[in-house]
Image (cartoon, helix red, strand yellow):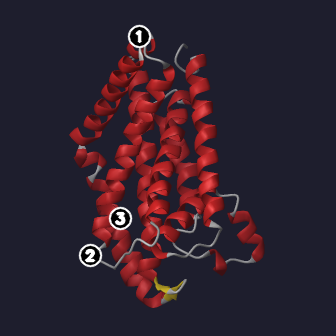
Amino acid sequence: MTRQQQLVALQTIVIKEIRRFMRIWLQTLLPPAITMTLYFVIFGHLVGSRIGDMGGFNYMQYIVPGLIMMAVITNSYANVVSSFYSAKFQRSVEEVLVSPVPNAVLLVGVTLGGVARGIAVGLIVTLLSLFFTDLALNHVFVVVYTVVMTATLFSLGGFINAVYAKSFDDINIVPTFILTPLTYLGGVFYSMDLLSPFWQGVSLLNPIVYMVNAFRYGILGVSDVNVWFSLGMITLLSAALFAYALRLLDRGTGLRE
């Protein structure tokens, strides 16, 4: 395929993915908005008013960046894992695989669809948060880069989960037993300064810690870990997952069985 044809193929895949989650917005965009609003009310307002300040900010301000990142992570992951596994289950993905479209174009297109949903939900949650607290952009580049790369990382993770999944039950194992615990233990609701030195060290093994803190730094200007190290970790993990996902696609893992 020529480069122009590859761009057309990429555009087609991305538009298809975006139309997919926009068509069922009652299932893809509305539920996370409602869930995050409940978090704002219960944790931020009711509980937060009794906790007091954290990191130099009131509790609501402190947890909002983490809640936005939680929404981005879960929705970018969910979009790709459900979309690609459905295509695999219905065998419609085979039509793309036998076409001249390079595997890298397919992977980038599906990933960008997940990124689009993650960013869309992140924007919705951000707008909702403004009804509960004031936010400011201290470092625009850090905010944008962190959101885009985090959505990319978890979109790739959702793709890998879909490749290995053999049933619809399998696409829920990773979010339930791995993604959710890591997110709740990733510093969304607390500062790492509250932990003992041992558990602070253990927390550094959690990649979501770096994403939440980088985004919090971009919004509030505070972080429990070095922000440039965090951005480097996100970039490295995204590159590693992309290479691994592309290798699985080239080998036909989970697609030729």
**What residue is drawn where x is 48% and y is 55%?**
145
Amino acid carrying mark 3 in the image: Met
Callout 3: helix, strand or loop? helix
What whole-number distance in Å separates the C-alpha atoms at marks 2 and 1? 48 Å
Q: Residues within 10 Å of mark 3 (few under 14, many from 20)?
A: many
Residue 122 visible, this orientation? yes
Inter-mark Cα distance, 1 to 3: 41 Å
Residue matched to label 1: 99
Residue topped by disc 3: 36
Q: Residue 146: horizontal and vertical position, in percent?
A: 50, 56
Tally of marks: 3
Q: Which residue is mark 2?
A: 131
Left or right placement of residue 233 versus residue 81 in this view = right
Amino acid of disc 1: Ser
* Amino acid identity at mark 2: Phe
Q: CA distance from mark 2 to mark 3?
A: 12 Å
Check if mark 2's residue and mark 1's residue have beta carbons within 8 Å.
Answer: no
Q: Residue at x 58, y 72 (%)?
A: 223
- Judge depth for marks 1 and 3 and give the one in front: 1
Looking at the rendered image, the quarter that the N terminus falls into is top left
Residue 126 drawn at (x, y percent): 33, 65
**Element at badge 1?**
loop
The percent position of residue 12, horizontal first and vertical second, equals 31, 26
Look at 38% across and 83% down and name the residue there. 46
Q: Quadrant of the C terminus?
A: top right
